[in-house]
Structures are given as C-alpha cells and as structure tokens.
Image (cartoon, rainbow, N blue to C red):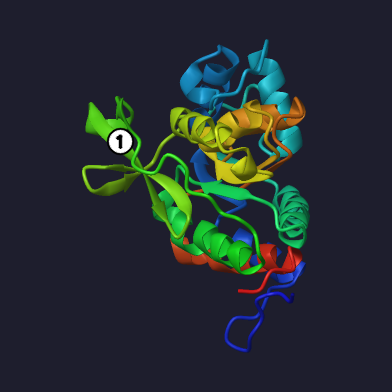
Amino acid sequence: MTGPESAAEPVPTRAELRAHLLRHYIAGDVATPRHNNLRHFRKMAEGDPYYQFGLDLGSWTYERTVAMMADLAGTSPDLDHWYGDDTIDVDRTLDALDAMGDRIGKAARERQTVVLATGHPAALLDVLYAPLADALRAAGCTVPTPADGWSYLSFEGRHGPETRTIRYTKGVAALEGEGELRHTHHSAPMEEMLANLAGESRYWPDLVIADHGWAGAAGEAGVSTVGFADCNDPALFAGHVLGKIEVCVPLDDFVLPRHYTPLTRYLMARADLSA
C-alpha cells in the first residue's frame, strides 16, 4: 500500500505539517483559554465522571494533572498562570501522530477489527475518521457498527433532556439528537457498543480509534485504543499514563474541518494506507 499522495493533495512532510498545525492553531497557540483548561483539570482530579471519560483513574491531584498536561500536551506548568492563552506543543502532537499512524498501520497489515467513534462529529467525522474507516476497510480490516440505533436520555450540553442515538456515518459512530449529530463526552455509548460486541467474539475490536468518552470507555475495557484530545480534556492523557490509552494525540479538536485534511493525509501515509 502507498500513502494518499497526488499532485493535487500531496502528503505533507513533518516540517510542512508542523507549519500547518501552527498556522491554523491546531497546535501551538490554541483557542482554548487557560482558565478553561484549569477548570477541567480540577474537575478530573476531583473525580467528576463527566471529565473522566469512562476511565477509572484512581487518585489524582490537581497539581499532578497540571504537571502531566505540561509533560504530555505542552500546556503551561505554571500553577499561577490562570488566564489568557494556553499552548499545545506541536512536536508532541507530531510525535503522537507518528505513534498513532504506526499503530493504525499494524491494524491494516494484520487486517484487524477496528471500531471508530467521535464525540466531535462536526469537526472531525468527515475529514478525519471517515477517510480512516474507508481506508481500513479497503485494506481488509473489519469495521463493525455495533449498537446502531441504541438510544438513551442525555442531559448533556445546552439542549436539555434529549434522546440521543448511536448513528454511523461510513462506519464511524457518533451521537444523534433531534436529527443532528451532537458533541459528547459520554462513555455510555461505547460501553453499549462493547457490550454488544462481547456476544460476537469474532468482532471484538483489536483497535479503537476515538476521542472523549468513546476512547475512554474502550481503554477502560482493555481494548487497544488510540485517541485525540484537546488540552482541556486531560482524562485520556491520564489514561495514557496508566497504560489504558495507547496513544493520545494533543490537538485543538474544534477548528474548521478542512484544516484537519493535511493531518489526515500525513497520518494515513504514516500508516501506509491508501486514500
């Protein structure tokens, strides 16, 4: 297999992708404000389930969380830095993308079973997850769609009580509410998907590619999991420290969708996947 390279859409080099990530604030100086990061760090350390993404993280302190995020994502280690901008270290992003690409490449070579899901469908589904799902199927992987149509009552977000349903787009799970795909931190949908697959052992995933609670629940279940996380989502990084999340890529997960396309091409080329 070869990477997705053409005259119109070349695969960026690491240096070119580095410049692109910085130019479009996917890494470097990101739009997530420092006070928001610190609030989420504290919520996770206090054991708030909404900020733990389905992971059993044991005992964490706020100070340990700040230090961990500085180490793994490149945010400020300064406990007195409360306001203004925060950062994601672009080289940590690139290193994690390389590690993720290597793991996805292994899945492709071995024709493994791969589950994909996103809590950020507006930004990431069409330009990142769906191309990966298509390429993995073309490589001979099984991409199951468990628990399609499963619903539950959610009190998440600004929409109030809402029935949310697992829906698949090109094999990628996301949550739908009132006819629209919704952002979510919840782990319950992935927990239901894995419960559904547990009765069909031949479809138990070898790999999950996801974010938010979709990734957290998979990692907690012992599935090899690679994920994306913003700098205000410390749980997946903590899961990585504990060995529950294999790779966690730090990035801003809500910029204009088209700006993720070079990242997708780079990741797929690293995995030796055809477009």
Residue sitting nearer the eye, 117 or 136 = 136
| Left or right side of 29 for 50 | left
Quadrant including the N terminus: bottom right
| Residue at point 60%, 23% (across, down) | 55
> In this rendering, is residue 145 above or below 194?
below
Residue 204 point in image, percent of width and height: 62, 40
Residue 161 point in image, percent of width and height: 23, 26
Q: Residue furthest bottom?
A: 7
Residue 258 point in image, percent of width and height: 47, 67
Quadrant including the C terminus: bottom right
| Residue at point 46%, 23% (across, down) | 50
Name the amino acid type tagged 1: Arg
Q: Secondary structure at mark 1?
A: strand
Residue sitting nearer the eye, 9 or 108 = 108
Q: Is residue 173 visible?
A: yes
Snapshot quadrant of residue 16:
bottom right
> In this rendering, is residue 104 above or below 219?
below
Residue sitting nearer the eye, 135 or 254 = 135
Residue 254 point in image, percent of width and height: 46, 50
Q: Around disc 1, counting alpha carbons within 10 Å, would you say few (fewer than 14), some (14 to 19), or many (20 or more)?
A: many
| Residue at point 57%, 86% (across, down) | 8
* Disc 1 target residue: 164
| Residue at point 44%, 54% (across, down) | 123
> In this rendering, is residue 3 above or below 165?
below
